[in-house]
Image: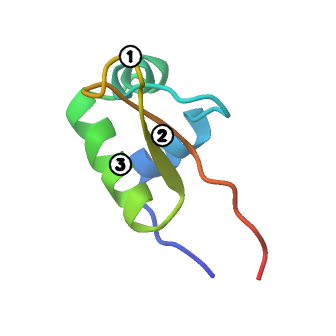
């Protein structure tokens, strides 16, 4: 399966870690605007590449991490 992803989505995907990271942290890490990061995360979620996680201490805060991909 192949994806045609925008350049910003690839940047965000490459910046993701195994631990949840916020969109603000991703914006800082990639030098992209928060709006661009949110769009990139939306595209990545729609393609099943990113997992969205809600923090237990504050359900309003979200983190994102790479989804574990399995061949097949």
Of the two numbered discs 3 and 2 on the same chain, state the one appearing first in sequence. Answer: 2
Q: Are marks 3 and 2 in contact (CB under 8 Å)?
A: yes
- Determine the secondary structure under disc 1: loop
Residue drawn where x is 31% and y is 19% of the image: 58
Q: Tell whether 49 sits left or right of 33.
A: right
The disc at residue 40 is 3
Q: Nearer the viewer, residue 60 or 51?
A: 60
Q: Quadrant of residue 5?
A: bottom left
The disc at residue 57 is 1
Separation (CA) of disc 3 from disc 2: 7 Å
Is 39 located above or below residue 49 in the figure? above
Q: Residues within 10 Å of mark 3 (few under 14, many from 20)?
A: many
Separation (CA) of disc 1 from disc 3: 26 Å
- Which residue is identified by label 2? 12
Residue drawn where x is 69% and y is 55% of the image: 68
Is 71 located above or below residue 62 in the figure? below
């Amino acid at each position: 399966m192949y994806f045609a992803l925008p350049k910003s989505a690839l940047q965000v995907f490459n910046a993701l870690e195994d631990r949840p990271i916020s969109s603000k942290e991703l914006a800082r890490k990639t030098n992209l605007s928060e709006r661009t990061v949110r769009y990139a995360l939306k595209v990545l979620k729609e393609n099943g590449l990113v997992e969205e996680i809600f923090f237990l201490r504050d359900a309003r805060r979200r983190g994102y991490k790479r989804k574990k991909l399995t061949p097949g």
